[in-house]
Amino acid sequence: MNRFALLFFLLLIPFLSSAQEDALAEDAFFIRRIYDEALTRSRCFDWLNYLTQQIGGRLAGSPQSAAAVEYTRRVLDSLELDTVWLQPCMVPYWVRGEKEQVRVVNSLKMGTVELNGLALGNSVGTGPMGITAEVVEVKGLSQVDSLGESLRNKIVFFNGAMDATQLNTFNAYGKAAGQRVWGASRASRYGALGVLVRSLTTRLDDIPHTGSTVYEDDAVPIPAIAISTRDAELLSRLLRQEPVRVFMRSTSQNLGEVPSFNVIGEVRGREFPEEIILVGGHLDSWDVGSGAHDDGAGCVQAMEVLHLIRRMGYQPKRTIRCVLFMNEENGLRGARAYRESSDERGEYHMAAIESDRGGFTPRGFTADGHDDVFTDKFRKVIEWLPLLEPYGLALRKGGSGADISGLKGQKGLLFGFEPDTQRYFDYHHTPIDGVDVVNKRELELGAAAIMSLVYLLDKYGI
Amino acid sequence: MNRFALLFFLLLIPFLSSAQEDALAEDAFFIRRIYDEALTRSRCFDWLNYLTQQIGGRLAGSPQSAAAVEYTRRVLDSLELDTVWLQPCMVPYWVRGEKEQVRVVNSLKMGTVELNGLALGNSVGTGPMGITAEVVEVKGLSQVDSLGESLRNKIVFFNGAMDATQLNTFNAYGKAAGQRVWGASRASRYGALGVLVRSLTTRLDDIPHTGSTVYEDDAVPIPAIAISTRDAELLSRLLRQEPVRVFMRSTSQNLGEVPSFNVIGEVRGREFPEEIILVGGHLDSWDVGSGAHDDGAGCVQAMEVLHLIRRMGYQPKRTIRCVLFMNEENGLRGARAYRESSDERGEYHMAAIESDRGGFTPRGFTADGHDDVFTDKFRKVIEWLPLLEPYGLALRKGGSGADISGLKGQKGLLFGFEPDTQRYFDYHHTPIDGVDVVNKRELELGAAAIMSLVYLLDKYGI
């Protein structure tokens, strides 16, 4: 890659004016300074420590989410920005309740077997007595439709596995996540009593992964619980040998809507303050674990960008705004409130960068945008590759992030920060997503990568 | 990077014959199959589990190293190779003895302070009574020479820190490791009684990192103990305030030479059996921890290459040989025995690939070779980049590996497998280098990367 970058440089140089050469050297030098700062004097890992260890899991509406709003607002205040504010939004408040129970009952082969379960977010509970019913295994949503009415009064077990051969684990996740999001609604159409869902990870282990389920408007809500991959394998094996009945119990419930906030801080641009460059992550997380990779990492990286700007005495031409979105996990209400308010005020996000794929070693950015402008604008950004490739950063077309994709109508460029994807789904939405599985250097390198792109966006515009 | 790979392809296609196009497609397809196999049916992670959990730390000469020889030989036997054998070598047998003690005594500021220490490998002990002496801090070897005779009867504290701003942590390690390897010899010249060495990691924590020290032939051997980075910072702070005396005690000793083995298995080539492609790692590790990244990972990846060859029914043209070297950590005796025997028999290693930089997500390979042939041969290998880049693999000039670099005289190409370097020195030579910090997918991707290069080397030769 460095080889190609070098080649690119060498091919370019004959066509550059001496002023352009100077600018290139200045940029290379500034980006090297960003990395030096981030790797030696950044504060993002300390902030992540606090967010995860002192506050913990931060599901929207929870007391922890309120503490996270207050903590990050105070941190942003301490960075001497031009403005720090809280943007109100109403969020659904879902609570898990008592520890879930999932149990194979009266198996001829194995007697009673306890399975590791976690209710899916937004799921209704089973009622205090739980549900016991025969289990029917399916591999995905379409199989539900073909089984149809035979699912009445059954528990439907979605056992679609993530495809381990996908090099980018997000591709495998994208293909398998439908059963978690829509499985309960689909099974409910045919009178099923509840659903069990195989956890979304390529690992074979005992850790269940939660995540949101969505009830379609016309669906009778039925309870949905994720079970660990090893338990999914066991249940599937058992089903090949005998009919299986499962007891499932969850006291989870939706407590209605409560007020919450996006946390926002910005440094105002000197020349083009109306052109906004957003950096963001989402402040809420699941209630289990402490949301370190998902998405404490993205939040502290976005905050670190403003910290780096202040530490390095950088005076941006454009407005650099850090947004910590609320309720990405189970409603995207923060994202909606932000977009609506931004559109109303006629703002223009020249660029937005979301970090929500974990705090791993950076690989680059995916870029997205409105069809009217994307090709031209992306062509401009691609010219900066020789400055980014020495740091292992690529740029490719691809989705940006759930919180910022609604800004596409403003016709700027949207970026998703892209770290190495191999480990993300080991931890995603689990009790083990803690700061102990985040590497400090990898987190800092991510902040440096995002700041480097912000610098180029700010200096040259698009 | 994919963008460049694609460009490369598109530029090439007009010049390709249809036979060449077919070969390219066949290679792309085969490499995809390698990855599919490695990510779904490999055994390397299970082997690593056994090596680390059932056997543990495997310092050359130890009972554990003998158990590792026996275990890996049995695994290779089970793969139905053409030949599996043990190659004898004599190795130094060093033992750590009782738990080391390092203690600041009678500090005015802090009283008595225990420091976390680990004797360096090959180090002599202090004698049962330990040593107490005044501490002098230096940043590196050259400072020892300038202080000279003032170090007599002192403990010299080498406090050179690894440079956190190096993106490739191995560069930072390379610059800082001299004090660990040569510090005791250098300080001994001027009559120092012992040395303390700051652990080689960019992390600030309480975990000491061992590693080899080497006594020059004319040096009076003095004891050397590594202390954790946090303790090094504390000691340095204290030294700025007052004279500091430290008590250090280690009962480590060298027990002379004992017999051991390299473990070797090979599949003989059908067309050019005399052209050998070596894949290897080192079977020994430090006694603390269980040598998971260093270098259990490299060993099981090399073994997995032979496993993949057999599972996929691949018939190599050339001889593919897996070598698990003994005693890389504190003597390189296995490497020497292998090279001497190979040279004597007039063998030709067309290529050798060592994996000894941890089991992290692959980034590519560094390549090295004899000056007479390197440029031409490397040019040939570079042509395969479009097949490797879709898997995130680059090729660059750089060192290969300590065990294989002696084969340079045979004028083949030498490769070092290069994974992501960010986390390696968190674990390197410590009690926490266990299988729990190795990610199964990342390990498997490494095996697939090495097998892909082996396939191209075997099919096309160089």
Image (cartoon, coloured by chain):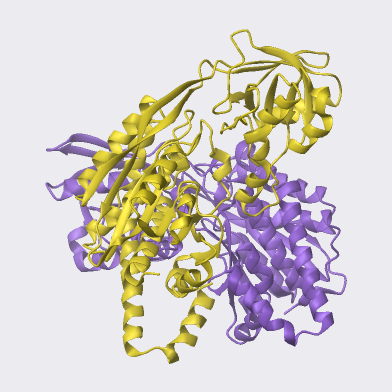
Chain colours: A yellow, B purple
Which residue is located at x 32 percent, y 30 percent?
A: A67
Viewer-side residue, B123 vs B302:
B302
The quarter of the picture where the C terminus of chain A appears is bottom left
Picture quadrant of residue B182: bottom left
Total numbered labels: 0
Nearer to us in this view, B323 or A354: A354
Left or right for A173, reference B312: left
**Left or right position of A332 against B182:** right
Residue A152 screen position, x and y as percent: 78, 20
Looking at the image, residue A447 lies above or below residue A72: below
Residue pictured at 21% horizontal, 68% vertical: B146
Residue B320 in percent (x, y) is at 77, 65
**Residue that sits furthest to the top in the current view:** A129
Q: Is residue B335 visible from the viewing direction of this image?
A: yes
Q: Position of residue B30 (x, y in %)?
A: 78, 64
- A425 shown above or below A197: below
Q: Is residue B61 left or right of residue B278?
A: left
Question: Residue pushed farthest bottom?
Answer: A14
- Image quadrant in which the N terminus of chain A is located: bottom right
In this view, the residue in front, A391 or A219, is A219
Q: Residue at x 77, y 84 (%)?
A: B16
Judge by depth and name the residue closer to the eye, A82 or B376.
A82
Residue A57 in view (yes/no): no
Whole-percent x, y for residue A349 in the image: 38, 58
Q: Residue at x 71, y 51 (%)?
A: A165
